[in-house]
Image (cartoon, helix red, strand yellow):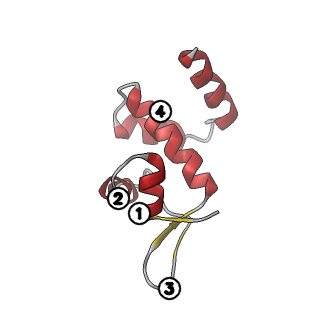
Amino acid sequence: MEYTVTELARLAGVSSRTLRYYDKIGLLKPARINSSGYRIYDEKNVDTLQQILFYRELGMSLNHIRDIITSPSFDRTKALKEHRMKLL
């Protein structure tokens, strides 16, 4: 499934401006930009956004979050398990 900025913003409960800012700072790049210039996000982007929002809830800065999720040693499955433990 693919989403535009507006659709993903509504789905995630954030503003379109937030998603555009995340793109600008290199935190959440869209999967592609269509011929009309719209940012298009895929399921992997949705998962990444969920990670970002979780870390934001923990009070982490966007720079720190970017360092975490762009690290070559970042393990998405391990991170999800850690999130689950923190929530429990």
Tell me whether circle 4 and circle 1 mark residues in contact (CB < 8 Å).
no
Q: Which residue is mark 3?
A: 35
Q: Where residue 33 appears, x then y in whole percent? A: 50, 75
Quadrant, the N terminus: bottom right
Tag of residue 61: none
Q: Which residue is mark 4?
A: 54
Tell me whether circle 1 and circle 2 mark residues in contact (CB < 8 Å).
yes
Mark 3 is surrounded, within 10 Å at the Cα level, by few (under 14), some (14 to 19) or many (20 or more) other residues, namely: few
Residue found farthest to the top:
88
The answer to whether 46 appears left or right of 52 in the picture is right
Counting residues from the start of the chain, the first of labels 4 and 2 encountered is 2
The three-letter code of the residue at mark 3 reads Ser
Quadrant, the C terminus: top right
Mark 1 is surrounded, within 10 Å at the Cα level, by few (under 14), some (14 to 19) or many (20 or more) other residues, namely: some
Image vertical order of residue 50 relative to residue 81, above or below: below
Q: Where residue 45 appears, x then y in whole percent? A: 56, 54
Counting residues from the start of the chain, the first of labels 1 and 2 encountered is 1
Which mark is in front, 4 or 2?
Answer: 2
Counting residues from the start of the chain, the first of labels 4 and 3 encountered is 3
Distance (Cα) linking label 4 and label 3: 32 Å
Tag of residue 16: 2
The three-letter code of the residue at mark 1 reads Thr
Task: Look at 56% across and 51% down and name the residue there.
Answer: 46
Residue found farthest to the bottom:
35
The three-letter code of the residue at mark 4 reads Phe
The answer to whether 43 appears left or right of 57 in the picture is right
Tag of residue 6: 1
The answer to whether 88 appears left or right of 77 in the picture is left
Mark 2 is surrounded, within 10 Å at the Cα level, by few (under 14), some (14 to 19) or many (20 or more) other residues, namely: some
Task: Look at 51% across and 79% down and name the residue there.
Answer: 34
Picture quadrant of residue 57 = top left
